[in-house]
Image (cartoon, rainbow, N blue to C red):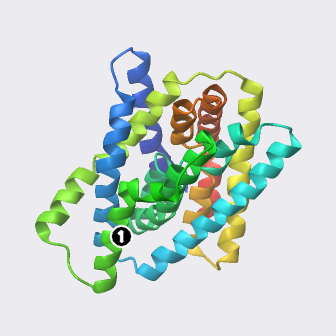
Amino acid sequence: MTSQLFAIIAPIFVAAALGFGWARSKRAWDTEFVTTLTYYIGTPMLVFSTLTSTPLTATAFFAMAGAALAALGGFIIFGILALLAFRLPVRQHLAPLIFPNAGNMGLPLCLFAFGEPGLALGIAYFTVTSISNFTLGIWINSGAGSPLQIFRTPLIYAVAAALVLMISGHDVPLWLANTTELIGALTIPLILITLGVSLATLKVSNIRRAFGLAFFRLLMGFGVGVAVAHLFGFDGMARGIVILQSAMPVAVFAFLFAQRYNNSPEDVAGAVVVSTALSFLSMPLLLLAIL
């Protein structure tokens, strides 16, 4: 079991450590460019390629997406209650609590823990959190937003195209399959290295508050994940994916949006750094609980 856990964790840690070391050596790394590249091109390609090449039914996809929605609802409820209890501003601190890093960390862990089928289910969960982050997340941080924002999210078009092919039973043309596989393959290494760069460059302004938010995000995520998996009757890999994705640290995009809309970005940066550091320490225990 020890060697299995190490095989899952090591690629995540090494890739993030490369990014951390790269940033500490003062070498150039355009985080905004890489984030934009993976958001608009890399991730949609990875999603389309994985969903169309893995034997995943549309029913399984929608079941996992439903579980992700249920988990998001749980995060919102418990997040608001916790912030009110500790008398912290809801608008400034809610987004870091409700949006897990289901992309940068979650997808690689799903892949290494459960293989391509696990990655496909992880993508179903990630699709919900990503679309929610770019709609609800923007609304929380800016104080305004529109449901039409969902149509500006490239991920939704990749998922829709893949689902059409999955339901209809049509094969993907070989040139398209090869192209999306090639370009999509760059996504996971880039997002992990960028995660390491972010950890090296983000500053923790209030360590006590950052630790509190980070610890609550991880603990709440695990608890809600277990509850949702039980509610949906999941077992095996599906149960593991829900718990794993739900228990991820604060999403890096939570900081990017907080920074863009000047919504306490220093506090969110601290929550990202501390929750990610804690997740590296708790990752073996999390994996033991789901494998």
List the single residue furthest toward the top: 26
Nearer to the camera, 145 or 288: 145
**What residue is rendered at 60% in x and 66% in y?**
69
**Mark 1: few, some, or many residues within 10 Å (few <14, many ≥20)?**
few
The residue under label 1 is which amino acid type?
Ala
- In the picture, residue 289 is in which quadrant? bottom right
Up/down of 125 relative to 211, above or below: below
Image position, residue 143 (x, y; %): 63, 43
Res. 45 in view: yes
Give the image location of residue 249, x and y in percent: 60, 44
Residue at horizontal 44 percent and vertical 28 percent from the top: 197
Q: Dividing the image into 4 quarters, which one contains the N terminus?
A: bottom right
Please identify the quarter of the rendering in which residue 210 is found. Answer: top right
Seen at 54% across and 30% down, the residue is 259
Q: How many marks?
A: 1
Up/down of 165 relative to 65, above or below: below
Task: Classify residue 74 as left or right of residue 138.
Answer: right
Q: Residue furthest left?
A: 175
Q: Which type of secondary structure does the marked residue at label 1 adopt?
A: helix
Quadrant location of the C terminus in the rendered image? bottom right
Is residue 264 positioned above or below 130 on the image?
Answer: above
Q: Which of the two residues, 96 or 211, is positioned nearer the viewer here?
A: 96
Label 1 sits on residue: 160
Q: For residue 54, say whether it is visible.
A: no
Instruction: Name which residue lies at 58% across and 34% down.
Output: 258
